[in-house]
Image: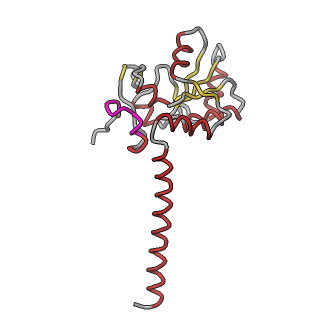
Amino acid sequence: MSTRGILLLAGLFALAFVLLAAGKCGYAKIESIQTMENAIAQVRRDFPRVKPASTKTVELYQASSMTLLIVDARTEAEFAVSHLPGALHFTKVAEVAEAVDSMDKKPDTVLVYGALGFRSAEFAEKLQRGKVANVEHLEGGIFQWANEGLPLVEPAGEPTKVVHPYNKLWGRLLNENLRYEPEE
């Protein structure tokens, strides 16, 4: 083998080791927060300016006379499997601002949720910067909501118990009997 070939092969091995190390570091971070409590704590650390709302708080909001705009910040595919009753699917700040502006009575709270809380807290932060008032995010997201046996609906409005698990790794925080399994 030529010197050039040996150098190329050595470079490929070095690149493989770098990629493996980077992947392992990312996986280690995900592994370190593989409990709901750790995930919630990490979201609080990453997004300290976003007000969290527990599932109990949201239930109180729903039982009261307050106006609540519930925003699902997950993907369309996740939303299509199930969502909180009354939730609307938005992924852009302008869409939420337009929805708020079109409401006869402005919402007392705009509640954003995702699978666990990372995407919703990030989106809630963007909404706050976009001048949307009274934004909170659901701690533990739809996973916590479903794990507690709270109501979910499918797009037709029928009750369901399954939730899109986002991916296999994060889906471990969702009770196994609640995980949506796509037909193959």
Give the percent coordinates (x, y) of residue 84.
46, 23
Q: Residue at x 36, y 23 (%)?
A: 160
Q: Quadrant of the N terminus?
A: bottom left
Q: Quadrant of the C terminus?
A: top left
- Image-quadrant location for residue 136: top right
Q: Residue at x 48, y 62 (%)?
A: 21
Q: Is 53 included in the stretch rendered in magenta?
A: no
Give the percent coordinates (x, y) of residue 44.
60, 35
Q: Is 175 included in the stretch rendered in magenta?
A: yes
Quick check: 175 left or right of 44?
left
Give the percent coordinates (x, y) of residue 31.
45, 47
- Image-quadrant location for residue 159: top left
Magenta span covers which residues?
A: 171-178
In this view of the protein, which residue sits in the foreground, 49 or 38?
38
Count of numbered circles in the view = 0
Q: Residue at x 58, y 29 (%)?
A: 137
How was this image coloured? secondary structure
Q: Residue at x 58, y 24 (%)?
A: 53
Residue at the top extreme of this rendering: 65
In this view of the protein, which residue sits in the foreground, 70 or 80?
70
- Image-quadrant location for residue 122: top right
Give the percent coordinates (x, y) of residue 125.
65, 35
Residue at the bottom extreme of this rendering: 2
Quick check: 16 left or right of 44?
left
